[in-house]
Image (cartoon, rainbow, N blue to C red):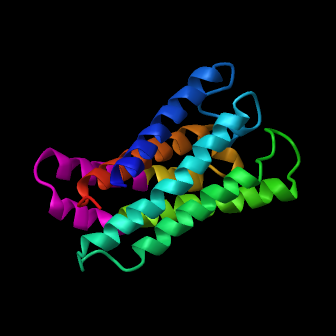
Amino acid sequence: MERVAAALYGLDLLFLLSFQILNRDMPVFARPVSEYGLGRTARLFRVYLIAGCIAPPILAWQIHASGDPDFPVMLPVYLALVALGRLGIAIWRSDPHGAPPTRSGNIHHVATLLAFTSAFMVVIEATPQLFALHEGARSMADHVLKYVISVSFLAVVLTISSPLRRWFGLAERVFLWSTAIWFLLATLTLPPL
């Protein structure tokens, strides 16, 4: 099962890259990733989100099955919330750039906030235990990714407001790429199911 989760996190990275390649006409850093769900890549965007709903419960199972008492008990809950948030993002579409807010767009934003915050909490709480399981370069990668994710999460929060909005897409992409890499490494680090 852990190979399935690892493959899904690897697919996350491939999806993010393919969205950018297939939407070269869209400004890279100014627009949110959810804009990929409104155009010609809308179906692919939904597949990306649904795949992201399957992997977190597998990772939660891996954490539980590891039997490591040092993992915080809230990790499976946060991972379930990541999956729930991504499902919400898939169901409720974002509003197009510059369009007035709609109910669907507002729910989409709440689901995004849930998914991002829960993923951030998983990284913050699980990194010390993963660090203990690694040696050398992998443990350094855990810490570097934790800091990149922390800074990019803060940047996402700060760039939601109008004066810094033009940098939102960059902050969001750094957060999504770094969390996908962190989750992939975590899945490969924990004992197999």
The quarter holding residue 172 reads: top right
Q: Quadrant of residue 75?
A: bottom left
Q: Is residue 83 left or right of residue 10?
A: right
Does the magenta stretch mainly form a helix, a strand or a loop? helix
Horizontally, residue 106 falls left or right of residue 34, namely right
Give the percent coordinates (x, y) of residue 104: 82, 56
Q: Give the vertical position of 30 relative to 34 (above or below).
A: above
Q: Kindly tell me whether residue 101 is visible in this rendering.
A: yes
Q: Residue at x 34, y 77 (%)?
A: 72
Of residue 94 and residue 49, the one placed in the foreground of this image is: 49
Which residue shows up at 81% across the image and 46% down it?
95
- Where in the figure is residue 147, as x and y percent of width and height? 34, 53
Taking depth in this image into account, of 158 and 90 the one nearest to the observer is: 90
**What x and y, as percent, mark residue 101?**
85, 52
Relative height, residue 168 to residue 186 (above, below): above
Nearest the eye: 71 or 28: 71
Q: Which of 156/22 is in front?
A: 22
Please identify the quadrant where the C terminus is shown.
bottom left
Give residue 73's quadrant in the image: bottom left
Residue 16: % across, % down = 53, 35
Q: Quadrant of the N terminus?
A: bottom left
For the point 79% across and 38% down, the residue is: 97
Position of residue 109 in the picture relative to residue 71 (left or right):
right
Q: Bounds of the magenta span?
A: 125-150
